[in-house]
Image: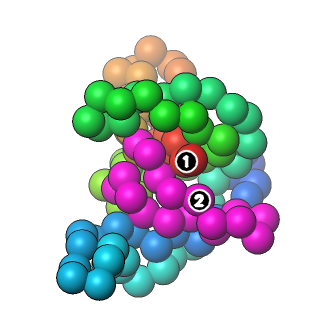
Amino acid sequence: MRIPARFLVHTVTVRPYAGRSSSGPVFGAPFPLQCMAQGARRMVRGGDGTQNLSTLTLLAAPGQAATVPPGSEVDWQGDTTTVLSAIDHDSGGLGAPDHTEVACE
Protein backbone atom coordinates (compact mmCIF):
# COMPACT_ATOMS: atom_id res chain seq x y z
CA MET A 1 0.00 0.00 0.00
CA ARG A 2 1.37 3.40 -0.97
CA ILE A 3 1.05 6.57 1.08
CA PRO A 4 -2.25 8.12 -0.09
CA ALA A 5 -1.80 10.97 -2.59
CA ARG A 6 -4.21 13.11 -0.55
CA PHE A 7 -1.54 13.28 2.19
CA LEU A 8 1.07 14.76 -0.18
CA VAL A 9 -0.18 18.33 0.22
CA HIS A 10 3.14 20.21 -0.01
CA THR A 11 5.58 20.78 -2.85
CA VAL A 12 9.27 21.37 -2.17
CA THR A 13 12.06 22.04 -4.65
CA VAL A 14 14.96 19.59 -4.52
CA ARG A 15 18.44 20.20 -5.94
CA PRO A 16 20.01 16.72 -5.83
CA TYR A 17 23.59 16.52 -4.59
CA ALA A 18 25.86 15.30 -7.39
CA GLY A 19 29.30 15.56 -5.76
CA ARG A 20 32.03 18.11 -5.14
CA SER A 21 34.20 20.16 -7.43
CA SER A 22 37.15 22.42 -6.70
CA SER A 23 34.69 25.27 -6.14
CA GLY A 24 32.31 23.41 -3.81
CA PRO A 25 29.24 21.17 -3.97
CA VAL A 26 27.68 20.33 -7.34
CA PHE A 27 23.91 19.91 -7.70
CA GLY A 28 21.75 18.39 -10.40
CA ALA A 29 18.76 20.05 -12.02
CA PRO A 30 16.10 21.14 -9.51
CA PHE A 31 12.80 19.27 -9.47
CA PRO A 32 9.52 19.51 -7.51
CA LEU A 33 8.73 16.83 -4.94
CA GLN A 34 5.17 16.27 -3.75
CA CYS A 35 5.27 15.43 -0.06
CA MET A 36 3.91 16.00 3.41
CA ALA A 37 6.30 18.32 5.21
CA GLN A 38 6.58 18.20 9.01
CA GLY A 39 8.58 20.85 10.81
CA ALA A 40 9.68 19.18 14.05
CA ARG A 41 13.01 18.79 15.83
CA ARG A 42 14.37 15.25 16.24
CA MET A 43 17.70 13.48 16.28
CA VAL A 44 18.59 11.42 13.20
CA ARG A 45 21.63 9.30 12.44
CA GLY A 46 23.42 10.10 9.20
CA GLY A 47 24.91 7.55 6.82
CA ASP A 48 28.30 8.07 8.46
CA GLY A 49 26.91 7.27 11.92
CA THR A 50 26.89 10.82 13.27
CA GLN A 51 23.82 12.16 15.07
CA ASN A 52 22.29 15.34 13.70
CA LEU A 53 19.35 17.53 14.59
CA SER A 54 16.65 17.38 11.93
CA THR A 55 14.17 20.28 11.78
CA LEU A 56 12.19 19.14 8.73
CA THR A 57 10.89 15.70 7.72
CA LEU A 58 9.38 15.02 4.31
CA LEU A 59 7.16 12.03 3.58
CA ALA A 60 6.85 11.30 -0.15
CA ALA A 61 5.77 8.52 -2.48
CA PRO A 62 7.86 5.34 -2.15
CA GLY A 63 10.97 4.69 -4.21
CA GLN A 64 12.34 8.23 -4.24
CA ALA A 65 15.24 8.00 -1.77
CA ALA A 66 17.81 7.67 -4.59
CA THR A 67 16.62 10.95 -6.13
CA VAL A 68 17.21 12.88 -2.88
CA PRO A 69 20.68 11.81 -1.69
CA PRO A 70 22.25 13.22 1.49
CA GLY A 71 23.75 16.64 0.80
CA SER A 72 20.89 17.66 -1.53
CA GLU A 73 19.27 21.03 -0.96
CA VAL A 74 15.53 21.43 -0.31
CA ASP A 75 13.59 24.70 -0.55
CA TRP A 76 10.46 24.89 1.60
CA GLN A 77 8.54 27.97 2.74
CA GLY A 78 11.32 30.33 1.71
CA ASP A 79 14.08 28.43 3.53
CA THR A 80 16.81 26.20 2.13
CA THR A 81 17.87 23.14 4.11
CA THR A 82 20.22 20.21 3.51
CA VAL A 83 19.19 16.55 3.33
CA LEU A 84 20.69 14.42 6.13
CA SER A 85 19.17 11.08 5.09
CA ALA A 86 16.59 9.62 2.73
CA ILE A 87 15.08 6.19 3.34
CA ASP A 88 12.50 4.15 1.45
CA HIS A 89 10.07 2.44 3.83
CA ASP A 90 8.42 -0.76 2.54
CA SER A 91 5.85 -2.43 4.78
CA GLY A 92 6.32 -5.77 3.05
CA GLY A 93 2.60 -6.16 2.52
CA LEU A 94 1.66 -5.61 6.18
CA GLY A 95 -0.74 -2.80 5.31
CA ALA A 96 1.27 0.19 6.51
CA PRO A 97 1.79 2.87 3.86
CA ASP A 98 5.01 2.51 1.84
CA HIS A 99 6.77 5.87 1.55
CA THR A 100 10.07 7.73 1.34
CA GLU A 101 11.22 9.61 4.46
CA VAL A 102 13.65 12.53 3.98
CA ALA A 103 15.24 14.11 7.07
CA CYS A 104 16.63 17.63 6.60
CA GLU A 105 18.74 19.92 8.80
Q: Is residue 66 above or below residue 30?
A: above
Q: Main secondary structure of the magenta part?
A: strand
What secondary structure is found at the residue carrying circle 1? Answer: strand
Q: Residue furthest front?
A: 22
Instruction: Decide if residue 29 is on the left or right side of residue 97.
Output: left
Residue 91, percent from left and from top: 42, 22
- Image quadrant in which you'd find residue 17: bottom left
Q: Is residue 98 above or below residue 36?
A: above
The reply to whether residue 48 is in sight is: yes
Q: Residue furthest top?
A: 94
The range drawn in magenta is 69-85
Residue occupying image coordinates x 69% and y 32%: 41
Inspect the image, locate mark 2, and give the three-letter code of the amino acid beneath it.
Thr
Residue occupying image coordinates x 63% and y 66%: 80
Residue 69, numbered circle:
none
Instruction: Decide if residue 38 is on the left or right side of residue 66.
Output: right
Residue 24, percent from left and from top: 32, 77
- Image quadrant in which you'd find residue 47: top left
Task: Give neighbour class at mark 2: few <14, some 14-19, many 20+ (Cα, 10 Å).
Answer: some
Inspect the image, locate mark 1, and give the three-letter code of the amino acid beneath it.
Cys
What secondary structure is found at the residue carrying circle 2? Answer: strand
Viewer-nearest residue: 47 or 90:
47
Could you tell which of marks 1 and 2 lies nearer the N-terminus? 2
Viewer-nearest residue: 104 or 51:
51
For mark 2, what is the residue?
81
For mark 1, what is the residue?
104
Residue occupying image coordinates x 24% and y 70%: 19
Contact between labelled residues 2 and 1, with CB atoms less than 8 Å apart = yes
Residue 16, percent from left and from top: 39, 69
Residue occupying image coordinates x 49% and y 34%: 52
The reply to whether residue 33 is in sight is: no
Residue 55, percent from left and from top: 66, 41
